[in-house]
Amino acid sequence: MTPHRYFIINKPTNMVSQFVSPDDVGLLGDLDFDFPEGIHAVGRLDNQSEGLLILTTNKKVTNLLFQGEVPHKRTYWVNVGHYVSIETLNLLRNGIGIKVKGGVEYITSPCEVEIIERPKVLAKHPSEAREGVPNTWLMITLTEGKFHQVRKMVRTAGHRCKRLIRKSIEDLELGDLTPGGVKEIEEREFFGLLKISNWN
C-alpha cells in the first residue's frame, strides 16, 4: 500500500482550492509542483482568500479535522477598511449574527479577535488600502467554519474585508512559505501539529 502524503501550500489569491473547475479560474494544478495522484485539498479557501491550505492523498483527514468531537482552531490575518473600535472587537469576540445557507441568521460562537500590526512576512497586495487610508489588521481565531464566515463577520460589523490570509490550523503554521510555495510534511509530524491523536 502506498503511504499517504501530506503538504501545505500558501494559496495565492485568484486561485480556487481545487484541481479541476468548469470555470476559467486559477487551479492548484497551476502551481509549479508535481503533486501525487489522488491529492485533494482539505478545508478550502475561497478564490480571493490566501494562505495555509492542506493537500493530502489521505481521504480521512477532512473528517478527523473538521468533523471530530474536538473543534480545531483556525487563525486568520484579516485586513479591513477603517479603524476597528473596542465595541466592534467585543461584538466579533462574543458572537455576531451572519446569514448562512437558506438565508437563516446564525450567531457565531465566541472567538479570539485582536488588533495586530501588519504581519511582516506578507508581501504587499493590491487589495490592501492605499498608504494613508485608514485600515486595521486583525487576527481572528475560530473553531468553526461556516461558508465565508470571517468575511461575513467583519461585514456585519461594518467593515469591508480587503484581505484574508489563513495563518494556521492548530500548530500547523504557514510560516514564511511564499505565495504559491509548497512544503511536504511527514505523517507523524503532520498529525501532531494538528493535534489529532486518533489518525492510525
Image (cartoon, rainbow, N blue to C red):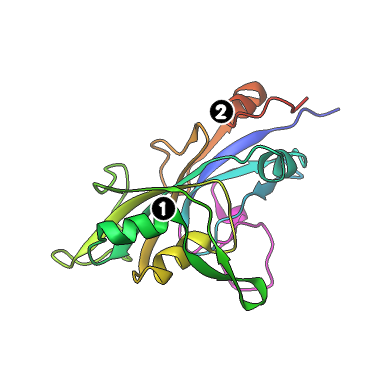
Which residue is drawn at the image coordinates 38% and 60% (left, top)? Answer: 91
Which residue is drawn at the image coordinates 69% and 72% (left, top)? Answer: 22
The front one of 152 and 5 is: 152
Foreground disc of the pair 1, 2: 1
Amino acid at dot 1: Arg
The front one of 68 and 126 is: 68
SS state under label 2:
helix
Q: Main secondary structure of the magenta part?
A: loop
Say which quadrant the N terminus sits in: top right
The front one of 157 and 32 is: 157
Quarter assignment of residue 189: top right
Pointer 1: what residue?
A: 93
Q: Could you give the CA–CA distance between mark 1 and mark 2, rounded to whole angstroms?
A: 25 Å
Amino acid at dot 2: Leu
Q: Position of residue 181 (x, y in %)?
A: 48, 43
Q: Position of residue 179 (x, y in %)?
A: 43, 48
Q: Is residue 151 left or right of residue 43?
A: left
For label 2, the crowd category at 10 Å Cα-Cα, with few meaning under 14, some 14 to 19 and many 20 or more, is few
Say which quadrant the C terminus sits in: top right
Q: What segment carries the magenta color?
A: 13-32
Residue 35 seen in render: no
The front one of 43 and 99 is: 99
Residue positioned most to the right: 1
Q: Is residue 74 above or below residue 199?
A: below
Q: Is residue 75 above or below residue 160?
A: above
- Residue 55's disc is none
Pointer 2: what residue?
A: 193
